[in-house]
Image (cartoon, rainbow, N blue to C red):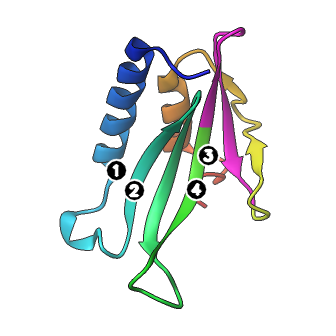
Amino acid sequence: MAFTEFEQALVETKASAFIEARRPPVELRAQIDLAYRISGQSVEIFEIRPQFDDPSQSMEHSIAKATWVKSDERWKIYWQGVDLAWQRYDLLPEAKHLDGFLDAVTDDPAGCFWG
């Protein structure tokens, strides 16, 4: 089930502000950039970089994901392990608001999101 129009607008506003505050300077964005996508009830934050073997192509590296569970009214928070599987973020597995997820990604005391 997708977000309502209101929920979608709120998520886009918060995710856009988060990304814009953390994107590298314009002159570096061809080498590394930051973006987000919304898919169903999830928000994913990822890096965009040139492909190692073909710099004319870009690749994405997932950083963090939060999935809204409407029945619990909670965001479940995930990080991507080296096996590329999404893992629950043990330090804060859930957040009541999207801001809690974005704060966890910013703070990242365990180094799960930013390494």
- Using residue 56 as the reference point, say whether residue 25 is left or right of it: left
Give the CA distance from mark 1 to mark 2.
Answer: 8 Å
Residue 34 marker: 2
**Within the magenta stretch, is there residue 48?**
no
The region drawn magenta spans 66-81
- Where, by quadrant of the figure, is residue 18 drawn? top left
- Looking at the picture, how far across and down is residue 102, in whole percent? 49, 34
Report the mark closest to the observer, 1 or 3. Answer: 1
- The kind of residue on which mark 1 rests is Arg
Q: Which residue is mark 3?
A: 109
Report the mark closest to the observer, 4 or 1. Answer: 4
Lower position in the chain sequence, tag 1 or tag 3: 1
Give the CA distance from mark 2 to mark 4.
Answer: 10 Å
Depth check: give the residue in front, 33 or 40. Answer: 40
Q: Which residue is mark 4?
A: 62
- The kind of residue on which mark 2 rests is Leu
